[in-house]
Amino acid sequence: MGITSALVLYAVIWFMTFLIVIPIRLKTQGDMGKVVPGTHAGSPEVHNLKRKAWITTGVSAVLWAIIAGIIVSGVITVRDLDGWMFNRMGPPSGQ
């Protein structure tokens, strides 16, 4: 895996994890009972975005290490995934 591939993999994992973490413990204006005129009651009152970004960074680093380790070690290859799901690639060229 090249450096660019590793960075792209980390970015994808980070953003997917961030989208999962954002709604956790979100307090809306409707929950707090203080709806600002002109806004929706579902708008966040307390979002703790900086803390959630740090949590996302840590979780993503662990997930990236596991997934990158699997890719680099060759335990699971693209050919394995194709064989389990689609079977379009055919047998390896050496066989």
Image: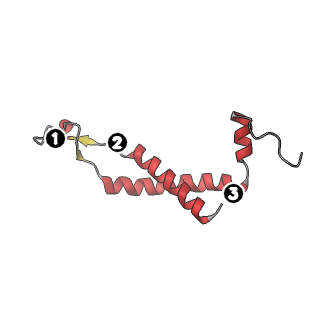
Q: To which residue does mark 1 refer? A: 39
Compared with 51, 34 (above or below) is above
| Residue at the left extreme of this rendering | 37
Work out which quarter of the rendered image holds the N terminus and state it.
bottom right
Position in image of residue 86 (x %, y %) = 70, 34
Q: Residue at x 13, y 39 (%)?
A: 35
| Residue at the bottom extreme of this rendering | 3
Q: Residue 34, located in which quarter of the rendered image?
A: top left
Q: Residue at x 50, y 52 (%)?
A: 12
Indicate which disc, 1 or 2, sits on the residue closer to the N terminus.
2
Front in this rendered view, residue 60 or 91? 91
Position in image of residue 25 (x %, y %) = 32, 42
The amino acid at mark 2 is Pro
Front in this rendered view, residue 46 or 87? 87
Work out which quarter of the rendered image holds the C terminus and state it.
top right
Position in image of residue 76 (x %, y %) = 71, 47
Real-space CA distance between mark 1 and mark 2, rounded to the nearest whole angstrom: 18 Å
* Tag in front: 3 or 1: 1
The amino acid at mark 1 is Thr
Q: To which residue does mark 2 refer? A: 23
Mark drawn on residue 72 = 3
Indicate which disc, 3 or 2, sits on the residue closer to the N terminus.
2
Secondary element under disc 1, as helix, strand or loop, is loop
Real-space CA distance between mark 3 and mark 1, rounded to the nearest whole angstrom: 48 Å
Image side of residue 44 versus residue 92, left or right: left
Mark drawn on residue 11 = none
The amino acid at mark 3 is Val
* Tag in front: 1 or 2: 1
Q: Residue at x 29, y 52 (%)?
A: 48
